[in-house]
Image (tube, rainbow, N blue to C red):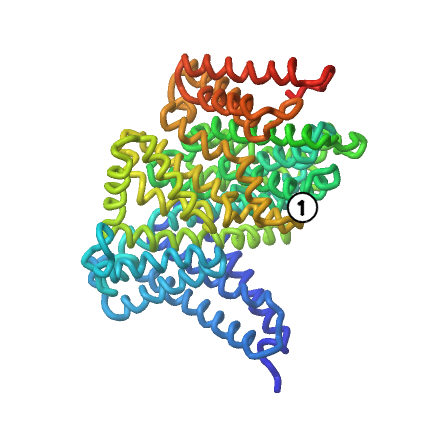
């Protein structure tokens, strides 16, 4: 008997062609609104998630398996879900005015469509981001329905299915809230820009320059991974995506020069995690912070410059120390790319990135800036034959960019379910009060509780939904304790970022481990150790706004200098090595010196500098062998 789904290959090809057309339509819709202005929130966001979910469900046709009953059933169900997605959210696009005029009194058909919308989002995010966020969103949805069965402060009166669906489907606090709005406007434009930078070989420039500058140094491939990830992070903003982009080159070279597989994977994972913290294009969470607080994206990016500097400086130092411990050398300089040739061949491909930075600095909107950066990437590509893009490549970049947004958009929509259920039940206020009570009004205790919660809730989640989930629950508590609202959001954002390398579920480390053929858990533990600065520094910028660029120039300069010295001290503590192995007592001095150097205050800065100076002197002049190559 002929199997119409598995045996006839043309069906798969048609479905995938339709998927590409939907992706192209999504990209063109986004570019059109970036150029001529966005539609009403409900239209923009509904159209966006409509395309996204239809593309997600048709993705099943990439599986060419044809034997058995399940592939037929799976593909049939997926086609049905894709069609339902177009109907449910298409209805919202064309009847938004009617929905607005109901004032929360939806009819039975609208309630049914809203229920399907929730289910479609939950299944879509399961397929793109995995079970964790689906489970968490479902728990919050059930909590809104059956809160009357929960104990203690978590108890509420419980709401009917009609009330919950109405709140999620027909209000600004549910599916179509700020997270999805940010994905539908800003994030997708920057993701498409990243696709264009890739097709015009801008990534070649970053990789070649990174290896040319650091490849011949001690531990060269690892240092190149750090530098390349910092550069690539400016256009990817995703830890796992950055691992996939740069790890394919850096991990084999690190292993070749002597790094253990676990260490090679960990270095790539921790460097790639920093991509989400690296201006000018950070992770999706940074765009959501800007939209939530009503600030320009340039303000958020500027605030992240110093923490990103600390992070990558610390990782770079630890990589160097790791190479020193293992006695590793760099690559033969003859095999490395030439800086001059790289600039000649690919230097023009970074012009769009320069334009983007200038536009953001001048205060233009992120969406507008991203659009013109895309146009610029196409224009400058014609300057060299090796980078010139054809119409087919332009279409391909649009399709690839649109497909890269799928997990982010689905996660943002699922996060809307969470935030909607939190707002209707008042859970955020309850948890804020609980944190204040548990902390006894002490800020440091509240920060520790927040950090623990964001790491736990962020396990297995993409950074954006992890940030959204904790921010909704905890930011009110932090602001009540006197934390500036921007610092509170950034504190949570950095915790969400480092969840990518926090065991037992650390997606960036797992991705790198698969490429390094190493133990995922060992890789994650090493990555967490190397990236510890991202967990520590946010505690300090809560107390010292100069670390996020708030204050006088002198305050900021002093904060940068002492902070970098502090990062050096923390790196010595983590690695336990400087010229030679560091004893436990000296190692403890490095930890204390590093921490109090970052902590604001003249006295703490002086004491911290003295302690680190003692550590360096002892290691070099007492324990270090004569004529040993200096580490820094």
Horizontal placement of 493 versus 204: left or right? left
Q: Is residue 40 visible?
A: yes
Indicate whether 143 appears above or below 552.
below
In the depicted view, which residue is nearer to us: 472 or 567? 567
Instruction: From the top left corner, tell me how far across and down residue 527 is, in percent.
Output: 56, 40
Residue 124 in which image quadrant:
bottom left
Q: Residue at x 49, y 42 (%)?
A: 371
Reading the image, the residue beneath label 1 is: 248
Q: Kindly state the secondary structure of the residue where label 1 is placed.
A: helix
In the depicted view, which residue is nearer to us: 513 or 424? 513
Q: Residue furthest right?
A: 334
Q: Is residue 385 visible?
A: no
**Quadrant of the drawing holding the N terminus:** bottom right
Q: Residue at x 40, y 61 (%)?
A: 122
Instruction: From the top left corner, tell me how far across and down residue 41 is, in percent.
Output: 33, 50
Q: Residue at x 49, y 57 (%)?
A: 128
Q: Residue at x 32, y 35 (%)?
A: 446
Indicate whether 96 appears above or below 196.
below
Indicate whether 539 appears above or below 69.
above
In the depicted view, which residue is nearer to us: 477 or 112? 477
Horizontal placement of 178 versus 223: left or right? left
Determine crowd level at label 1: few under 14, some 14-19, many 20+ residues with C-alpha closer than 10 A: some
Q: Residue furthest bottom?
A: 1
Instruction: From the top left corner, tell me how far across and down residue 76 is, in percent.
Output: 50, 74
In the depicted view, which residue is nearer to us: 119 or 541? 541
The total number of labels drawn is 1
Instruction: From the top left corner, tell me how far across and down residue 629 is, in percent.
Output: 71, 19
């Amino acid at each position: 008997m002929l199997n119409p789904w598995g045996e006839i290959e043309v069906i798969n090809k048609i479905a995938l062609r339709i998927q590409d057309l939907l992706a192209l339509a999504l990209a063109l819709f986004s570019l059109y609104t970036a150029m001529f202005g966005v539609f009403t929130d409900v239209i923009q966001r509904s159209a966006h998630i409509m395309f996204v979910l239809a593309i997600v469900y048709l993705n099943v046709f990439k599986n060419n398996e044809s034997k058995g009953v399940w592939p037929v059933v799976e593909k049939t169900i997926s086609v049905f879900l894709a069609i339902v997605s177009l109907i449910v959210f298409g209805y919202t696009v064309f009847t938004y005015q009617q929905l607005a005029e109901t004032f929360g009194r939806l009819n039975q058909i609208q309630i049914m469509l809203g229920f399907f919308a929730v289910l479609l989002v939950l299944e879509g995010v399961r397929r793109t981001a995995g079970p964790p966020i689906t489970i968490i969103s479902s728990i919050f949805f059930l909590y809104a329905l059956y809160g009357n069965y929960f104990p203690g402060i978590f108890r509420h009166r419980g709401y009917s299915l009609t009330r919950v669906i109405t709140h999620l489907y027909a209000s600004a606090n549910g599916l179509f809230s700020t997270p999805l709005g940010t994905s539908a406007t800003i994030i997708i434009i920057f993701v498409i820009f990243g696709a264009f930078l890739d097709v015009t070989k801008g990534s070649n420039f970053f990789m070649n320059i990174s290896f040319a500058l650091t490849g011949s140094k001690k531990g060269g491939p690892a240092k190149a991974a750090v530098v390349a990830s910092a550069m690539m992070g400016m256009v990817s903003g995703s830890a796992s995506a950055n691992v996939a982009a740069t790890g394919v080159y850096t991990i084999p070279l690190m292993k070749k020069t002597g790094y253990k597989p676990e260490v090679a994977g960990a270095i790539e994972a921790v460097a790639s995690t920093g991509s989400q913290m690296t201006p000018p294009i950070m992770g999706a969470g940074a765009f959501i912070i800007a939209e939530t607080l009503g600030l320009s994206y340039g303000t958020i990016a500027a605030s992240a410059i110093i923490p990103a500097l600390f992070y990558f400086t610390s990782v770079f130092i630890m990589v160097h120390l790791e190479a020193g411990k293992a006695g590793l050398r760099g690559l033969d300089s003859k095999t490395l790319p030439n800086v001059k040739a790289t600039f000649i061949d690919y230097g023009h491909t970074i012009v769009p990135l320069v334009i983007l930075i200038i536009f953001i600095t001048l205060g233009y909107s992120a969406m507008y800036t991203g659009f013109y950066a895309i146009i610029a990437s196409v224009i400058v590509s014609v300057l060299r034959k090796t980078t010139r893009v054809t119409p087919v490549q332009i279409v391909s970049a649009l399709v690839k960019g649109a497909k890269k947004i799928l997990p982010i958009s689905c996660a943002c929509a699922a996060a809307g379910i969470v935030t909607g259920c939190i707002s209707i039940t008042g859970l955020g206020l309850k948890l804020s009060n609980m944190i204040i009570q548990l902390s006894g009004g002490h800020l440091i205790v509240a920060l520790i509780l927040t950090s623990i919660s964001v790491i736990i809730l962020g396990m297995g989640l993409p950074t954006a939904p992890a940030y959204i989930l904790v921010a909704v629950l905890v930011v009110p508590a932090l602001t009540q304790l006197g934390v500036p609202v921007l610092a509170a959001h950034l504190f949570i954002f950095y915790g969400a970022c480092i969840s990518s390398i926090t065991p037992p579920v650390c997606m960036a480390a797992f991705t790198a481990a698969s490429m390094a053929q190493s133990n995922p858990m060992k890789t994650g533990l090493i990555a967490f150790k190397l990236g510890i600065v991202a967990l520590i520094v946010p505690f300090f910028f809560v107390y010292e706004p100069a670390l996020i660029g708030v204050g006088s120039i002198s305050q900021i300069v002093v904060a940068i200098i002492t902070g970098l010295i502090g990062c050096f001290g923390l790196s010595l503590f983590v690695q336990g090595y400087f010229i030679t192995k560091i004893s436990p007592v000296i190692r403890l001095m490095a930890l204390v010196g590093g921490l109090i150097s970052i902590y604001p205050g003249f006295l703490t800065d002086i004491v911290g500098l003295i302690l680190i100076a003692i550590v360096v002197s002892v290691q070099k002049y007492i324990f270090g062998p004569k004529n040993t190559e200096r580490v820094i």
